[in-house]
Image (spheres, grey):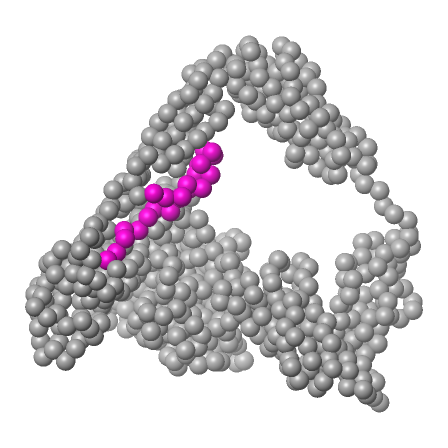
Amino acid sequence: MRRAVMRVLIAAGSATVATVTLAVMASAVPVTPSSPRQGRLTQVGPLAEHGFPAWYGDSSGVRLEACTTLDDPLCPVLTDEVPDPGQPVSYPDNFPGEFFYQLAGASLTLTGGARATVGLDLEGAWANDAVREGDQMVFGRVRIRFAAPTGERYRITHPYGVDELVSANGAVNATEDVGTVPGAFGGALNSRIGPFLKWDPAVAPAAPAGYTGNPAVEHRIVGSPYGTNFVKIERLDATGAVIAEAGRTDLFTVQGRIAVNSGLTVQQATYTVGADGKGVVEVYATSDPGRALAVTGDTAAGFRTTRMRGQDGRYYARLPVTGTAPAAVEVTNLSDSPATRRTRALVDVVTVTKAAYDAGQHTLTVTAESSDRDATPGVLTVTGFGAPGTTPFTDVVAPPATVTVTSSKGGSATVPVIGAGPAMTADAPVAVVTAPATAAAGQTVTLDGSGSLGVVDSWAWRQTAGPAVTLTGATTAKPAFVAATAGAYTFQLVATGPGGASSPATATVTVGAATATVAAAGPDQTVARGRTVTLDGSASRSADTLAWRQVSGPAVTLAGAATAKPTFTMPLVALPAAPGPNPAYTVNTAPLTFELTATGPSGASTDQVVVTGQAETLSSVTARYRTRGEWRISGTSSLPAGQTVVAVLGGDLKGVVVGQGTVDATGAFDLRPATPAPGSATTVSVISAAGGQALAVPITITS
């Protein structure tokens, strides 16, 4: 692994939480912060295909999934953490030695010139540094490092607490890992990590959609449970008094991807087989609502791969058995990428023969039986109610959609409840009206009653105040009008449904004098290539419609071109094609220009905005070729964003392609192809998909 995980385990009784002491190379004492903790990690998701939790959740409702791919620059795996970085990540043959749910930290220069780093991570790794089933572990890590004279004492305040350390061997080098017991994934909830750190939404730019931040950009953050969204390092005297502040920063790098994968948990798998060898298998599983789960087919049992039914995150399948019932079944979450697969042993079958609710009597009747009918039959229980039987459960005002009956022999069954008794009637709807507070004369104004609550069959609008206007669509959810003169216009909505008519709801729109239509396409932007760009025409005035179009630069697809805030992906620079040569190759880094046309009662107005790719510098680029057949071309990028780097023989990017690699999270790249030999070439040139170039780098030939 690139970074060895210090695993000094401290066991306390039968506790499942392991702690790596904070004092690795320095004497360290965590200090209780002055303010109480507000928030932490609270949830561990179901397991994913690789055996780690699909996600972790915190008390603020943020769920982050494991960053286990090579193709996401905002949530990357380090290339040297997988056996073959040229192939997709797969489990277990090409899976990283370590990865992160959160990778966050800050670096700062202290008054004495030393560079200090503080890392605050939720990390997945392997107990014995090798990918092996059963060795998966996830731990929260706090790491503090900087050079300091031996014996000096410091206090470090960071988002997850306060630590006091004494330098040893010329450095403060302390690591705390909590949760390093394989398979005990809840242990990380007891670490100091949490809630997750994310970019401060009050500070531009906003975090990329679906992420807590961009690991390539330093930014102010929120999320500290103590309100200490900064790092402060203070030097102390022997008594613990502060001598001086050695450094402070509120800028952090943050990596975290909002969870889209869900994993799955197979809650139960049951079977019943008769004397004739025929029967059924029933499978119960859970995941996030709306996922696609399937039970893998079993030829010997006689059933094929079958999709499960889902409701509110619960999933169910009932499969015929015409042969030998299997010892276990496999369930797959097809919605995950990669798909998650889990197995479960079969247990006895519980058959629910009746689950009926009487809406008039408020009673629920459940009868059931178990397939285990020997001398010690299973004892059945209806979850949340008691023993099933012909005697109904009383005082059930609102029944569950399903009931679950469990057996003492391990089986269970969940079935829908069938209702009877008098039908319930709908309540009268509640009318809700929204409308713009102000408008200009001649402008189309739309009223909106679609947010009305309850079942609505019809809308009835009428004007109650202001100069008379024609209300187009007065019996629809969204009527519109155009006011010719300034004034206050009031409208009333009555919504009607099967439960009757609502009370009237009103809204007033103040119409001012006509004003000129002005298009405002927003300020020019500089954006890293490969990122999502959002244009902003929301500052346009007196506009009924907005229309965007691209007028120059490499063509992109503009999503939402008729909205105030369309988006597109900033194009990467096209790279030389392997194997080359590419005599017609050119580098196109031209900025993109977009024009916004705003149309309103006063006519049309246009404005333009220019989006430029963020400049990238490739530095410290060296090229070495060993005559036994090995290249090593390395350097650093000013944009550590996971972009592809290509090296070409010669000084103009038109020659034979040597190889390609990826910029890692530290900004470094390292290409090590075996061929082609340099031949008569004395230089190589390097170009990145982010636009950086290093031309005519001399080749050093060694044996």
Magenta highlight on residue 570: yes
**100 versus 59 height, above or below:** below
Residue 698 image position (x, y, % from top left): 8, 63
Determine whether 432 is above or below 255 in the image: above
Q: What residue appears at the point 13 percent right and 67 percent down from the top-left corner?
A: 623
Residue at image position (70%, 37%) is: 453
> Residue 70 at x, y = what percent?
37, 64
- 258, 254: nearer the viewer: 258
Left or right: 90, with 700 as reference point: right
Read off the magenta span: 555-576
Q: Nearer the viewer, residue 629 or 125?
A: 629
Per the picture, the main secondary structure of the magenta-coloured stretch is loop
Q: How many marks?
A: 0
Quarter of the image containing the C terminus? bottom left
Taking the spot 67% from the left edge, 62% from the top edge, the residue there is: 310
Looking at the rendering, in which quadrant would you find the N terminus?
Answer: bottom left
Q: Position of residue 700 (x, y in %)?
A: 8, 69
Q: Where is residue 227 shown, x and y percent of the image?
A: 42, 50
Residue at image point 47% right, 39% down: 560
- Determine which quarter of the picture holds residue 697: bottom left
